[in-house]
Amino acid sequence: MKKKKFSLFGSKNTNPLETQGDDKTLLSDHQADKTLAGVQHIEPQQLVYGCAQSVGKQREHNEDCIFALSIAIGGEPISLPIGLFIVADGMGGHQYGEVASSTAVRTLAGYIFKQIQPFLVNPATIMEESIREVMRSAITEAQRAVTQTAPSSGTTLTAALIFGQQVTIGHVGDSRAYIIHPEGGGEVLTRDHSLVKRLEELGQISPEEAAIHPRRNVLYRALGQGEILEPDVFTAPFPRVGCLLLCSDGLWGVLAENKLFQLVFSAQDPQTACQRLVTAANEAGGPDNISVIVVKPTP
């Protein structure tokens, strides 16, 4: 028996021609190349994304903030997708948590687009900073803005800036970025800046103990907390197949990773994946605000 083939967001028929019964159609090499080229590759490549939020089942208001924007540039001398995706989780129990997350997201997005706008208008423009330097400076600006706008508050921040086949991650706190593979597995890209995660890294507690530890939501690094901030900033390949997922701990904290990966893998498109994830988190009790973004490239 032949094994069925599946794609990350539902199966697609890539056969150039449909045949009836045992009838066969013979194509010339030129016709075959033309047909396959039309099916396999379309310019410009774009980013397809979905996003969803919920206040959850046990919170009165939403302290999360998300941002999702995709740009497609086609034609000479450049043809590539560009996207910026951000998840921020205002710190519960602090004053103005929702103000902190919104301020951080808007400040970071504004700074990044101010820096890359000359390149978007004229690809020959040489940027003064590298993409990683832009991300790091944007987080510094967000830190300053949160400190001024929402004192005594704080927020996590996980941002992904995609340029073609590269994604630059800026990260503070315990929101997460994952790469999800087309066969259904995945891996977390970010490192939680939490007390419990640090204890786990030091070997003092097991992953199973960390998952139920009473202080698992205590952070040692967040925007708006302290004068010196050391964000994690790094660049990784953006998956040609598979997808990128950003989420707050209201999602990953209540769903096992294999369940999270399976819900994305089995969905027909990114928006459906996000809606299913939020629903599943609420069905698991919804103890916190839930935010999720799923991004994938077109073929």
Image (spheres, grey):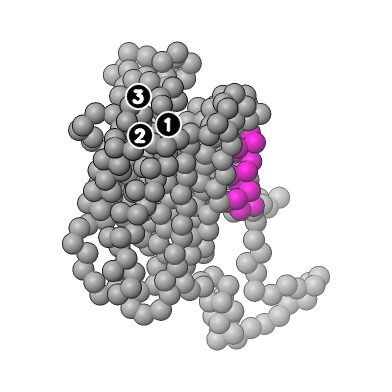
**Image quadrant where residue 13 sits:** bottom right
Residue 151 as seen in the image, left or right of residue 68:
left
Q: Which mark is residue 38?
A: none
**For this rendering, which residue is in front, 207 or 51?**
51
Region of the chain picked out in magenta, as a range: 268-280
- Number of numbered discs on residues: 3
Instruction: Determine which residue is flagged by label 3.
Output: 219
Under circle 1, the secondary element is helix
Asked whether 273 falls inside the magenta stretch, the response is: yes
> Magenta part mainly helix, strand or loop?
helix
Q: CA distance from mark 2 to mark 1?
A: 8 Å
- Dot placed on the residue nearer the N-terminal end, 3 or 2: 2
Question: Which residue matches tag 2?
Answer: 150
In this figure, which residue is indicated by the disc labeled 1?
A: 97
- Viewer can see residue 132: no
- The quarter holding residue 220 reads top left
Query: What SS does tag 3 mark?
Result: loop
Verify CB contact (< 8 Å) between mark 3 and mark 2.
no
